[in-house]
Amino acid sequence: MRKDITAVRRRKIRAARLSILSNTGLTVAKLGVGISSGSVSVLSEAAHSANDLAAAIIAYLAVRVADQPADDEHPYGHGKAESFSALFEASLILLAAAYIAYEAITRLFNDPRHIETGSGIAVMALSVVVNIAVSRHLFQVAGETDSLALRADAEHLRTDVLTSAGVIVGLGLVYLTGWGGFDSIAAAAVAGMICAAAIRLIRDAIQGLMDVRLPEPDLQKVVGVLDASPEVLAYHKLRSRKSGSYRHIDAHILVSDQLSFVEAHALTERLEDSIRQALPRTEVILHTEPYAVEVKHQHDEHGGPKPPASTVSGVH
C-alpha cells in the first residue's frame, strides 16, 4: 500500500515539474515577442503564461505537501493542501483576467497601434502545440491519481490553448485588415475565457474544503459492496468526503445477533478491503451493530410495531 502511494506521489511530482518547465519557456518567449511586436494580445498571453507558471509552482508545492502521510497533528493527512492550492490558483487567474481586460479596453479606445503580426502568430502557434501536449499529460496523471491540484494546472493550460488560438485569429485579422483593434478584441476574449476557468476551479476547490460527499458513481461502488454481502442485513449513516487525492468513508452496518465479535470483526475487515479495491486511495471505517438492537432502538423512538429491515429509519 505504501509503495503504491509513493509511486503515485512520484508521478504527480514529475507532472508538476513538467508544467513548470513548459510554462517558464512559454512565458519568456511570449514576453519577448509581445514587447518587440507591440501586440497587447501576445502580452496578455505572456501574463497568462506567467500566471500559469505561478500556478504550476503552487501545484508542485501542494502535491508535495498533500501526499505526506498523516501525523499526530494531521490525523486525516494533508490532502486538503490541493484544494487550497486550487483556490489560490483560481484567485491568480481572476487577477490576470482583470489586468488583461483593462489593457485590452484601454488600447482599443485609446491606442490601436501598429502591430507586427508574424512573430506573434508564430509564438502563439508554438504555445498551442506545447500546451496541448503538456495539458493532455497532466489530465491523464490527474485522472489516474485523482489530483485536484494537477487538474487545476491542466485546466490552466487547456485555457491557454483556447486563448492562444483566439490570439492567432485576432492577429490574422489585424494582418488582413490593418486595424489593430482586432488585437484588443482578441485580448478581451482571452480575459473572458480565463475568468470562466477560474470560476469552475473556485467551485471545485470550495467543494473539497467544505467536505462535499463523494460523487454518486463512487458512492454506488460502496453500496454495491455492502449490498453484495449476505451478512449485511442493512446499513445506515453512510458518510463520505474527499481530501486531495484521498477519500474517507464511514458507515454503520447491521448484522445478525448470532455473529460473534470475532466473526463481525472479520466481516468488517473483508468489506473494508473490498471497498478499498473498488476505490483506491480510500480510508474506510465500518462500525458493526446487532440488527435487533437497532430495530428496537427505532421502535422505542417512533413507537408502534417493530418495522422490517427495509423501513428502519435511516437504514438501507
Image: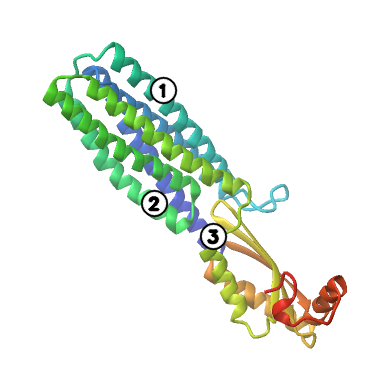
Residue ranking furthest to the bottom: 258
**Residue that appears at 37% across and 43% down:** 18
Judge left or right: residue 240 versus residue 118: right
Render colour scheme = rainbow
Tell me if label 1 and label 2 are in contact, CB under 8 Å.
no
**Residue that appears at 35% across and 35% down:** 23
**Residue that appears at 31% across and 23% down:** 43
Q: Which mark is residue 99?
A: 1
Check disc 2 and report its element: helix, strand or loop: helix
Picture mark count: 3
Q: Residues within 10 Å of mark 3 (few under 14, many from 20)?
A: few
Say which residue label 3 marks.
215
Say which label, 1 or 3, has the lower sequence index: 1
Residue 75 visible in the picture: yes
Which percent across, then down, holds residue 175?
13, 24
Residue 105, located in which quarter of the rendered image? top left
Residue ranking furthest to the left: 176
Q: Amino acid at mark 3?
A: Pro
Q: Amino acid at mark 2?
A: Phe
Say which label, 1 or 2, has the lower sequence index: 1
Say which label, 3 or 2, has the lower sequence index: 2
Residue ranking furthest to the top: 110
Judge left or right: residue 276 versus residue 102: right
Which percent across, then down, holds residue 83?
55, 44
Q: Amino acid at mark 1?
A: Tyr
Nearer to the camera, 209 or 150? 209
- Distance from disc 3 to disc 2, alpha carbons, whole Å, reads 19 Å
Above or below, 310 against 202 in this view is below
Say which residue label 2 marks.
139
From the viewer's perspective, is the residue at label 3 or at label 2 nearer? 3
